[in-house]
Structure formats: structure tokens, C-alpha cells
Amino acid sequence: MPITPDYQPGEAFMVQFVWKLPAEGFVRARFEAEVLSIDDKALRYFVWLRKFAGGWEESPTGKPLPREQASWAYWQRVEQIEGSRVNLAFEAADGRPLRLRLETLTGEHPFFSKYREN
């Protein structure tokens, strides 16, 4: 059975990214992703992360942490992701969180900056 995209260019869906923090715990962030184009051979969307829709930080057991315990340096980086253009597998639109390497958040890996327009 062929895999087909659920969304077409111009349509949007919510995507959730998750990063494991070095000290323990996780950062979760949600973005509204607008489909710019589709690569049917690679089964990927090329999307614009047009709006940061919120997020939270969790303990290693998944319990949400109070704002005063937040890792603010990481949250500043999360906010900078808004406006990025990235490739995402079709499965990214199903609502499940995408776990990414911390280096994608710190900028050591160009996942969010590869297609940045400056």
C-alpha cells in the first residue's frame, strides 16, 4: 500500500519536537507547520514552522515542571526555531512527538538552520 501525504501545499498541521536535556528531563515544543512542498519519492514534507504554539519542560518521569524550574537558555533557542524551514517525514503529521538530538536545538546540527533565509 503506497504511503501518501495527509496534507497538501498551503495546508498546515501541528508538529511536536522533543529534546532530552543533559541534566535530566525533556523539553517539548509545538509548532504550526505549513506545507510548502511535497517530495513523494522521499516521503517528506518541506514545511515552514510558521508559529511557535507553546511547550513545556518535563522531569525524567514525564511530570511537567513549574516555570521557575525551566531551562531558559534552551527555551530561548526553541523560540528561535519559529520561521525555520525543514524537511519532515509524512508521519510527522500524525501528532506523535518527534524526538530530536539536542544538537538540533543548540545549533550544532543544522536541522533548523539549513534552509534559513537571511
Image: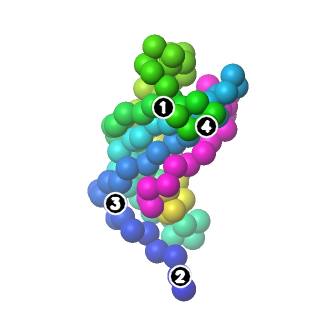
Q: Are marks 2 and 4 in contact (CB under 8 Å)?
A: no
Magenta span has 100?
yes
Q: Position of residue 18 (x, y in %)?
A: 56, 40
Q: Considering the numbered disc 4 on the image, is that residue within a helix, a strand or a loop? A: loop
Say which residue appears at 29% left-offset and 56% top-offset.
10
Which residue is denoted by mark 4 in the rendering?
61
- Where does label 1 land, which residue? 64
Above/below status of 105 relative to 4: above
Disc 2/disc 1 C-alpha distance (Å): 38 Å
Q: Identify residue for label 2.
A: 2
- Residue 9: which numbered mark, if any? 3
Q: Position of residue 56 (x, y in %)?
A: 45, 31
| Residue type highlighted by circle 3 | Pro
Q: Amino acid at mark 1?
A: Pro
Residue 69, image x, y percentages: 51, 16
Q: Quadrant of the N terminus?
A: bottom right
Determine the image quadrant of residue 89: bottom right
Where's the C terminus, which quadrant? Answer: top left
What's the residue type where badge 4 is placed? Thr
| CB atoms of marks 1 and 3 within 8 Å | no
